[in-house]
């Protein structure tokens, strides 16, 4: 049962990353089309590509980390603290990747005007 829960969580992370990658793909298209200055455009597209790679890393946690956690679950005697300790590296990795994404977004704002940003990242509907 717990293995199924872990699998569902990992699948959900992957699905969310797909939405983000789609948003980044769209932003790249907008930047390539709407940013007239070549240097800003190239810098923004390069940064967006790095953001996309980071999102993909977030969606695919390293197998050894997952395997360790799943092995603990299979033992049926693993304590809650053991499970928490096994998840800590995954959580730390996730936080580091999220911080990297935020830093890249802040840098990206320096490459785009407010109008270009609004077109590349329109607010959610409704």
Image (cartoon, helix red, strand yellow):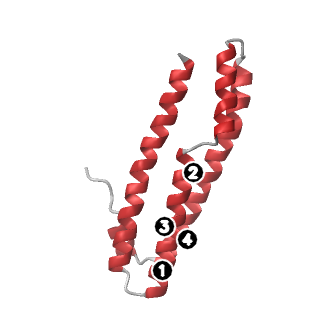
Q: Residue furthest left?
A: 126
Q: Look at 56% across and 19% down and name the residue there.
A: 2
Task: Name the element at disc 2.
Answer: helix
Task: Name the element at disc 3.
Answer: helix
Q: Nearer the viewer, mark 4 or mark 1?
A: 1
Compare marks 4 and 3 and give the one earlier in the sequence.
3
Residue bearing the label numbered 2: 57
Q: Is residue 15 above or below residue 107?
A: above
Q: Is the C-beta separation of discs 4 and 3 under 8 Å?
A: no
Residue bearing the label numbered 4: 107
For residue 57, side relative to residue 89 (left or right): left
Residue 77 at x, y = what percent?
71, 12
Toward which corner of the image does residue 100 lie, by quadrant? Answer: bottom right
Residue bearing the label numbered 3: 48
Compare marks 4 and 1 and give the one earlier in the sequence.
1
Label 4 – label 1 distance at C-alpha: 13 Å
Label 2 – label 3 distance at C-alpha: 14 Å
Residue 38 at x, y = what percent?
44, 87
Residue bearing the label numbered 1: 42
Q: Is the C-beta separation of discs 1 and 3 under 8 Å?
A: no
């Amino acid at each position: 049962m717990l293995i199924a829960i872990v699998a569902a969580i990992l699948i959900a992370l992957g699905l969310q990353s797909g939405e983000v990658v789609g948003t980044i793909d769209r932003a790249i298209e907008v930047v390539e089309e709407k940013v007239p200055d070549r240097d800003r455009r190239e810098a923004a597209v390069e940064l967006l590509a790095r953001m996309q790679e980071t999102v993909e890393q977030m969606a695919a946690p390293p197998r050894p980390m997952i395997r360790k956690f799943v092995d603990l679950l299979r033992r049926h005697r693993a304590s809650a603290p053991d499970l928490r300790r096994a998840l800590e590296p995954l959580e730390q990795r996730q936080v580091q990747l999220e911080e990297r994404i935020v830093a890249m977004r802040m840098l990206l704002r320096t490459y785009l005007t407010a109008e270009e940003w609004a077109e590349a990242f329109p607010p959610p509907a409704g």
